[in-house]
Amino acid sequence: MIYSFAKEDTRKEAFLEVLRSSGVDFELVEHDSAVVRVLGVVTPDLREKLDTVRDGRRSLTLKRRSETDCYSAFTDPNRLAVIAGPCAIESEEQIGAIVDFLSVEGVRYLRGGAYKPRTSCESFQGLGRPGLELLRKHADRAGMYVVTEVMDRSQVETVATYADILQVGSRNMFNYTLLTALGSVQKPVLLKRGMAATVAEWLKSAEYIMRGGNDRLILCERGIRTFEPTTSHTLDLAAVCIAAKESGLPVIADTSHACGRPDLVTPLAAAAVAAGASGIMVEIHPNPAEALSDGKQALTFNQFYRLLEKVTRIHSAIHE
Ligand code: PEP
Ligand code: MN
């Protein structure tokens, strides 16, 4: 299991003391922050002690206990739905490490693409069904929900077997046969905004799914194409507010694809939460430099840890 502490986090010493006194092996890597990798078995007793020491950020975990289905966190204004994971599932080792980390942090929604819509046909296209199997297996072991993309109507049945929430990617927001097929799926759908779609077009696409009887939708703003070249896209925060107001649906922000660079993912997520987004989606990777897709925008575990601290504080502040 991996635990991370920001430099200024005073709970680190007490945490290490609990590990030392319980005789469990661990590795400590310190640079701009500290990562503690626990090598020995974490018994439920030990886990409780470690959690007690880290009491400051248990709010996400508390939500875990009262949650009954995967859609309710998106519709309850007192909760913030956090979806995190790699751009693509690459290997058992990669997804295993990510799930170890996220589950300790209390994150409930695991993302990861098995079918990847890549701009270049030469790029890694995803592991397909074996990727879905890995995602499900590790999510189940940690009690997490799976959010993953379905690219084509021919994949709907397969993806719905493994996913809790089916994601429609930006490139497919106008794929009306796919949207229609998702109307009869009994699982929530996360509909990303097309990168060059207006809010009105986005909401029309949502209607295609709802017309089939599936009204458990989550809208996701993921940045739009503008003339600005310093970021991959431009996060349209007004659209988060307008889409929520006009549709009554939960709207979240994917701040990784919205900017394409790690230094902006956290400030944009903070802004989205402050603007009232129902949740955020963020790409993380144990080693972004070696990621098979979107490594340039992925957050490290430490960076994500800090993001979580920030957004949970902002969320609590505006919902007090
Ligand atoms: C993704 O979430 O991995 C993805 C491909 O995003 P988008 O469809 O927003 O580009
Ligand atoms: Mn990606």
Image: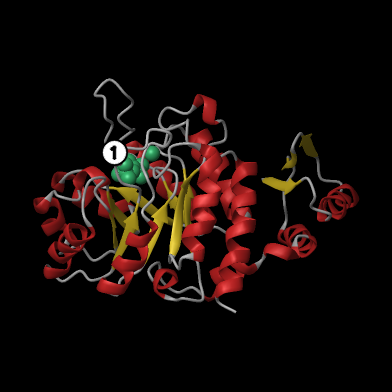
The amino acid beneath tag 1 is Tyr
Q: Which image quarter holds the N terminus?
A: top right
Q: Residue at x 80, y 50 (%)?
A: 8
- In the depicted structure, whether residue 260 falls above or below residue 150: above
The image quadrant in which ligand 2 is located? top left
Q: Is 158 positioned to the left or the right of 229 in the image? A: left
Residue 231 image-quadrant placement: top left
Quarter that holds the C terminus: bottom right
Image coordinates of residue 57 in percent, x first then y, are 68, 63
Q: Residue placed at 41% from the left, 71% from the top? A: 69
Residue 46 rendering spot, x and y as whole percentages: 77, 58
- Colour scheme shown: secondary structure
- Give the residue displayed 15% in from the left and 66% down from the top: 207
Q: Is mark 1 within 8 Å of ligand 1?
A: no
Residue 91, image x and y in percent? 46, 32
Compared with 3, 287 (above or below) is above
Question: Which of the 4 quarters of the picture holds residue 44?
Answer: bottom right
Is any atom of residue 191 visible in this view? yes
Q: Nearer the viewer, residue 59 or 128?
A: 59
Q: Is residue 132 visible?
A: no
Q: Residue furthest left?
A: 177
Count up the numbered dots.
1
Q: Which corner quadrant of the image does residue 201 belong to?
A: bottom left
Left or right: where 91 falls relative to 168: right
* Residue at screen point 56% across, 30% down: 287
Side of 231 where 199 appears, left or right? left
Classify 10 Å Cα crowding around label 1: few (below 14), some (14-19), many (20 and above): many
According to the image, label 1 marks what residue?
115
Image coordinates for residue 306, horizontal then vertical, percent? 64, 50
Does residue 45 appear to the left or right of 76 in the view shown?
A: right
| SS class, disc 1 | loop
